Amino acid sequence: MFEELSRKLDGILKQLRGQGKITEANVAETLREVRRVLLDADVHYKVAKEFVDGVLKKSTGVDVLQSITPGQQVVKVLYDELVALLGLTSSEIASSPLPPTVIMVAGLQGSGKTTFCAKLALYLKGQGRHPLLAAADVHRPAAIDQLLVLGKQVGIPVFADRTLGAVAIAHAAVDHARKNARDTVIIDTAGRLHVDDEMMREAEAIKAAVTPHEILFVVDAMTGQDAVNTARVFNERLKFHGAVLTKMDGDARGGAALSLRATVGTPIKFIGTGEKPEALEKFHPDRMASRILGMGDIVTLVEKAQQQFDQEKAVQLEAKLRKQQFTLEDFLEQLQEVKKMGPLSQVLGMLPGAHRLPQDATVDDHALVRIEAMIRSMTREERQRPQILNGSRRKRIAVGSGTSVQEVNRLLKQYEQMQKMMRTLGKRRHPGGMKLPLGM
């Protein structure tokens, strides 16, 4: 996510951070380069200019230029302005005091609108709500079937009636939710390949019929400046309450995310980070600014881990690690938990400095599959006592897992190194005499 933008900005700011003294002239030169990078990322030219002018104005004051670390202070100003550009605070989804809450989802065809509806339903379900999906896209072939399949996948009921028009479906879905104790209705509306008056009139008719508490505009983050232009047209007709950026796991340059709030005036509420139903994140301006500037997003990473890892099992695992009883069976279990957090590239992307990895560096998720296959090819005794793995056993494991003996040897070597590290951590103490937590 924003790897190219982060890499370019880091290259520009690196020299500035390292200088003990800076002047208004080299700050201005640095920000000219920042402006160029933003334009390359397809940020709207007016947004880029206003952003850079704001940073320059706040960076050339006496308090900044004569501080102990002026370069770091300029980066801090840049971060603060980036947060302001993205929206300062995260925005919540509406909740009506008189159920059901009606959420209308609009956008162009191919933006991931229908998939987002299912993701949002799963997200709200996790918050204790009882959503209902409404298939009101009666124009795209198989749109209703797609939503039915997605609804079944995430365990959310779908209201669909192929005999009704879009407006009647939306109205009937709200009535159905009211009668069946569903507190939220998510209406999937029709999209087109481009903005047209027929689509807008139908969307306006649905809005008038059900009076949604929340209208969300879904936009493909990879379309860059076109996304902002389309959002402006939709907002003029529908007055939507928030935007959703999908396909952020792809080759998104960042222009849409950085321009949308400033040009349309509505907050970004969610970002889609993959195809799986769980791949939806609430948008936090401060965390996104941190990612863009290469500072990582540890808070989101911790939240993902908390969602996937069982706290009781984690305590038991820590006790095993301290007693040096961590086995390959435990490792397999942890591996499966890590996989639930999403692709490794996304997980690593939340760590500070991840953008400094070589551009051709790849994170192979299939490597985890191979490791899992090797461990599963071992007997229960072999997983608990790896020291009994002689040459013939290793050869059998390699054949059974479709790998090589060298790969099995590498896995066991890494396991031994991890054991040594854990022994060191278990003995290490805080300078004040207190034993350090394992994670430290």
Image (cartoon, rainbow, N blue to C red):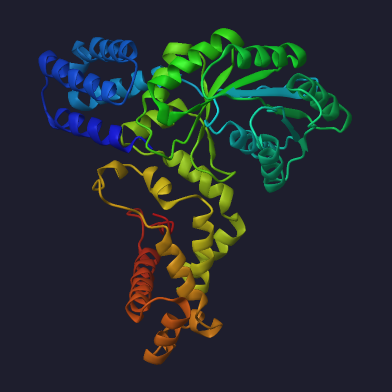
x, y percent for residue 101: 74, 23
Residue at left offset 85%, top offset 29%: 176
Quadrant of res 355: top left
Quadrant of res 414: bottom left
Tell which of 70 and 31 is nearer to you: 31
Quadrant of res 42: top left
Q: Is residue 78 above or below residue 339?
A: above
> In which quadrant of the rendered image does the N terminus lie?
top left
Residue at left offset 40%, top offset 66%: 426
The answer to whether residue 68 shows anywhere in this view is: no
x, y percent for residue 201: 65, 11
Residue at left offset 52%, top offset 49%: 305
Tell which of 281 and 251 is nearer to you: 251
Tell which of 388 and 254 is nearer to you: 254
Q: Is residue 29 above or below residue 330?
A: above
Q: Is residue 280 above or below residue 410?
A: above
x, y percent for residue 216: 60, 22
Judged left or right of residue 21, residue 228 is right
x, y percent for residue 151: 70, 42
Tell which of 334 and 193 is nearer to you: 193
The answer to whether residue 212 shows anywhere in this view is: yes
Residue at left offset 48%, top offset 45%: 302
> In which quadrant of the rendered image does the C terminus lie?
bottom left
**Number of marks in the rendered image:** 0
